[in-house]
Image (cartoon, helix red, strand yellow):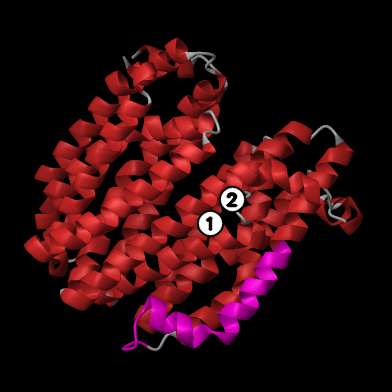
Amino acid sequence: MKFLKEILSKPLFKATSLNGISILIKIAIGFITSKVIAIFVGPSGMALVGNLRNFLTSTEAFATLGFENGVVKYVAEHKKEEQKLQQTLSTIFISVVSISALLCLILFFFSSYFNTSIFGVAFHYGFVFKALSIALPFYIGNIFLIATINGLGEYKKVIFINIIGSCIGLLVSVLLIWYWQTKGALLSIILTPSLLFLVSFLSINKELRLLKTVRFKFYNRSFLKSLSSYSLMALVSAVFGPMVLLAIRKNIILNLGIEQAGFWEAMTRISSYSFLFITSLIGIYFLPKLSLAKDNQETKILFREYYKGILPLFMVGMVCMYFLREFIIQILFTKAFLPVSKLFFWQLIGDVFKAASFILGYQFYAKKLTKAFIVFELFSLSVLYFSSIYCMTLFNIEGVVIGYAFTYAVYFFTLSVYFRKCLV
């Protein structure tokens, strides 16, 4: 494939290769963690873990104000201009700290409310949200520091931190789940990113004296306007997406039982692992090129490279996964999760349409089409929710993955119409 030869011939290949190693480690550790959760917690615990993950994604988006991509962009632009860099980091850091402090108070004093909303009245895990209120500043601080390191161009350090994070995550998860089962699984999700704060801080402090760089006198409210488009896109995805998934899972628990919700969460985990490489490749190789594309013709060439080179390989992988589904389930989980095999067909169909739409969706980021992105995102999430709930009433748990497949088929075709000038 021509584009792969192009990657190999450029320095960017080093970053891609290192990132590939990081992803392989992440997948391997994810497999082990899933196995441990399956053995000690079971399908019901898996469902609760999924709920907390979705909630944490939304909380993270609120706490960071969706600034993560903006931090990378503006630190990269101003890293050689000390005054602008100080203004960038001070404005973002002070804004994020203020919001995080408010969220910490809300999480601590309303922990019972969040427990009922996220887990239901039958469970008593309010302490998890109190623990999150204590860990959140370090959790968000780690995200901020990694984005800053990335903006400084120190991709090796970012990958190194990710690898350390994966290893720490495995150790913490296994120990906590071993001793406290479901409670331990929930706590491990919160604690692991927080423990990485010190590693990130020490890494960036060698490049940038952060404590001297961030000052109230450098705070500039008008600078926040330049980050608004990044915030809007990030917040819409990170807030409404998890909210929809939470709502669907709560409906499954209410109508089909928590065990069925655990099976759906297991299927979602398997799907997420299959997307790691493709999302990484789009982010590293295609997104920068889409951003630099001057006209529809240049964009069309990139789309063709993706649809002729990447998508067919992904489809072959999906076919292999389907025929090896029972083996995959037993490797990742336990025999108790074998009912997940009946979810594979429609989930993988949906994954293919989702992969087909990825390259089109990244065009919103590449060209900063904020309004169009929000419209399409809210439209697709609405379709996902209503189609999943409706199909569930007809086909039980299989209906949820049928709704997923239907959603991404609709999403792909509507994006194809919207970006038709770049495709035809």
Residue 121 is covered by the magenta coloring: yes
Q: Secondary structure at mark 2?
A: helix
Observer able to see residue 267? yes
**Highlighted magenta segment, given as a residue range:** 97-123
Residue 398 is left or right of residue 424, and the answer is: left
**Foreground of the two, 209 or 126:** 126
Task: Tell me the amino acid under the disc marked 2.
Answer: Ile
Residue 312 is covered by the magenta coloring: no
Image quarter in which the N terminus is found: top left
Q: Are marks 2 and 1 in contact (CB under 8 Å)?
A: yes
Residue 104 in the image: above or below residue 354? below
Residue drawn at x 40%, y 84% is: 116
Q: Which residue is mark 2?
A: 161
Image quarter in which the C terminus is found: top left
Q: Which residue is mark 1?
A: 165
> Callout 1: 10 Å neighbours few (<14), some, many (20+)?
many
What x and y, as percent, mark residue 210? 81, 53
Residue drawn at x 15%, y 50% is: 344
Q: Main secondary structure of the magenta part?
A: helix
Residue 411 is left or right of residue 328, and the answer is: right
**Foreground of the two, 423 or 417:** 417
Q: Secondary structure at mark 1?
A: helix
Residue drawn at x 47%, y 59% is: 239
